[in-house]
Amino acid sequence: MAKKRSVLDRYTTSQKYIVSRGKALTFPAAPFKKEIGPNEIYGAVIDMPMSPTVLASLVCFINGSANIYFNLGGEYINAAARYRGVAQASFDFIRLANDCLDCCKKTTKFDMPVAGKNYVYFLTKNGVYMTEIIPNAIAKEDESKRKIFNMYQRVMSQLRIAQMKDQAAGVSSGNVND
């Protein structure tokens, strides 16, 4: 009999996921130098446990791009190029996140969360800032964390709408893993 997986166990990850997440966390500011000031956020990586075996990383940038990568190698990419709602939600999230850096700490460690916690990483020219959000306790979190949570949930909602439109139209956009 297989040992039951604890919600505190680390997630199994594919090499594709590790590479995609790593590239996102180390993406340089140079392509966005006209859009951002010296202390402004240009990107975000949000690691979200979806189930005891599925971890998703949402990646957003100031240009409106928004992709989601799954720990076992699945992905949903390039929706912002086809759907204005995705691009607008991602752009708004990154712009508004600048007002929420007060709840973040600068980090050089990019561990993945265990169940029940979302890790939010913000990319700036001055380094990466991180905060931890507990979705089940969001009402008890400070205002900045509630804003961040609501903003990335809006991006997720727009990605889901785009995914349903793609499925209805028979469009393939990467290897979608639900």
Image (spheres, rainbow, N blue to C red):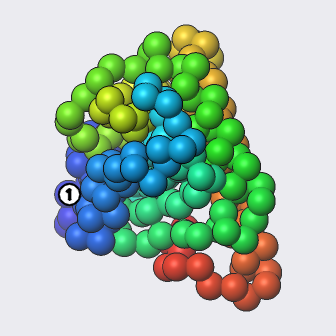
Frontmost residue, 149 versus 5: 149
Return the residue nearer the eye: 29 or 162: 29
**Residue under the image location 58 percent in, 19 percent down:** 99
**Which residue appears at 77% of the width and 55% of the height?**
85
| Left or right: 91 as drawn, with respect to 174 | right
Q: Is mark 1 on a helix, strand or loop?
A: loop
Task: State which quarter of the image contains the N terminus.
Answer: bottom left
Q: Mark 1 points at which residue?
A: 3
Tell me residue 80's x, y (percent).
Answer: 66, 63
Name the residue at 34% across, 63% down: 20
Q: Which of 168 and 64 is in front in this view?
A: 64
Q: Residue furthest front?
A: 34
Q: Which of the 4 quarters of the picture holds residue 34?
A: top right
- Whether residue 120 is visible: no
Residue type (three-letter) at the residue carrying disc 1: Lys
Q: Is residue 103 depicted above or below 11 in this figure?
A: above
Residue 105 image-quadrant placement: top left
Write the residue at 35% across / 52% down: 27
Q: Residues within 10 Å of mark 1 (few under 14, many from 20)?
A: few
Question: What is the x, y in percent for residue 57?
Answer: 43, 53
Is 114 located above or below residue 60 in the figure?
A: above
Residue 75 seen: yes
Picture coordinates of residue 15, whole percent (x, y): 23, 70
In-image side of 74 versus 150 (left or right): left
Q: x and y percent of residue 175 in the render?
A: 49, 79
Which quadrant does the C terminus fall into?
Answer: bottom right
Q: In this view, does 97 lie above or below 99?
A: below
Q: So how many labels did they put on this image?
A: 1
Q: In this view, does 53 lie to the left or right of 133?
A: left
